[in-house]
Amino acid sequence: MKINPLVSVIITTKNSQDFIEDCLLSIENQTYKNIEIIVVDNNSIDNTKKIAKKHTAKVFNKGPERSAQKNFGAKMSRGEYLLFLDSDMSLSKNVIKECINKFEGQKSIKSNLLALYIPEVVIGNSFWCHVRNFERSFYNATVIDAVRFIRKKGFLTVGGFDQSIWGGEDWDLDKRLKQQGRFEIITAPLYHNEQDFSIYSYLRKKAYYIKSFDRYINKWGRNDLDIKKQLGFYYRYFGVFIEHGKWKKLLTHPHLVLATLFLKVTVGFTYLLTKFRLLK
């Protein structure tokens, strides 16, 4: 068992001045302390870099997409473990400690544990933030989710993120990592700040990343079982909400169920419009 291995937290940013400090403070406030913070910005025109430099000397600029940013962050890291975060995310105080305990416990040392899911809680006061949190709660540790805490050796073995993919790049990494080792999930959550959520911005963002899905699909094939779940109708609209007894939660929040269905239908239409190049 190693004592306090170094963890490299890699944050990708672009015009993130409204969120980045909360993210950085949550890392500094972790109960686990042997951490290095690496911020990889993508040509921000606001105060993102200035704020980041108050918390770490490792602030870099890299593009054109987040896959390249993440790989660059891993290249600049010194840690034995990598934790990838978006700039609008923050950690509850025991996340990294629990991740290290999972990896460095006596049982895990002899296992092929390679990466960890971290439960995600969407925060914000609006009704749609509550809807998004309800929806997101069904995805933890499913194929719709993606691991965030990864043994660096395994990450390098599979070649990191595929930089030709900018939508579904985390799913692609998951699939390659699963060929090398095992995944688990911790209990301490991270918080995803969607306080500024608007349906219009949400759909525009979805449309942008949908444009890269064909690269991901073509890489693994349309008959791949994970892809059928991640992008297919049945699992995304029904299966993920009812499996493993999760259907019971649907009965207690009927208004959130209807609102979630509305969101998913609008995303579905956005996918079709983008797919047939009717939405630019």
Image: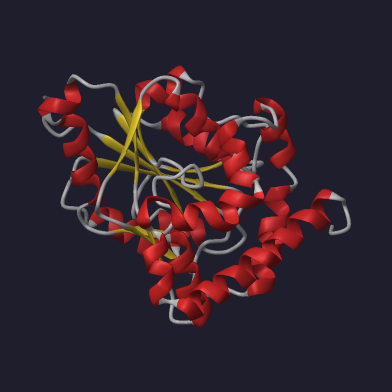
Tell me: residue 22, above or below residue 182: below
Note whether residue 9 is visible: yes
Residue located at (36% from left, 21% from top):
153
Nearer to us in this view, 72 or 221: 221
Residue located at (37% from left, 65% from top):
248
Note whether residue 2 is visible: no
Q: Is residue 93 left or right of residue 242?
A: left
Nearer to us in this view, 20 or 191: 191
Nearer to us in this view, 144 or 53: 144
Residue located at (65% from left, 27% from top):
220
Residue located at (36% from left, 23% from top):
181
Quarter of the rendering containing residue 107: top left
Quarter of the rendering containing residue 9: top left
> x, y (%) of residue 233?
65, 51
Nearer to us in this view, 215 or 64: 215
> x, y (%) of residue 14?
57, 55
Q: Is residue 257 left or right of residue 263?
A: left
Display colour scheme: secondary structure
Quarter holding the N terminus?
top left
Q: How many marks?
A: 0
Tell me: residue 49, above or below residue 228: below
Quarter holding the C terminus?
bottom right
> x, y (%) of residue 91?
31, 57
Q: Is residue 280 left or right of residue 95?
A: right
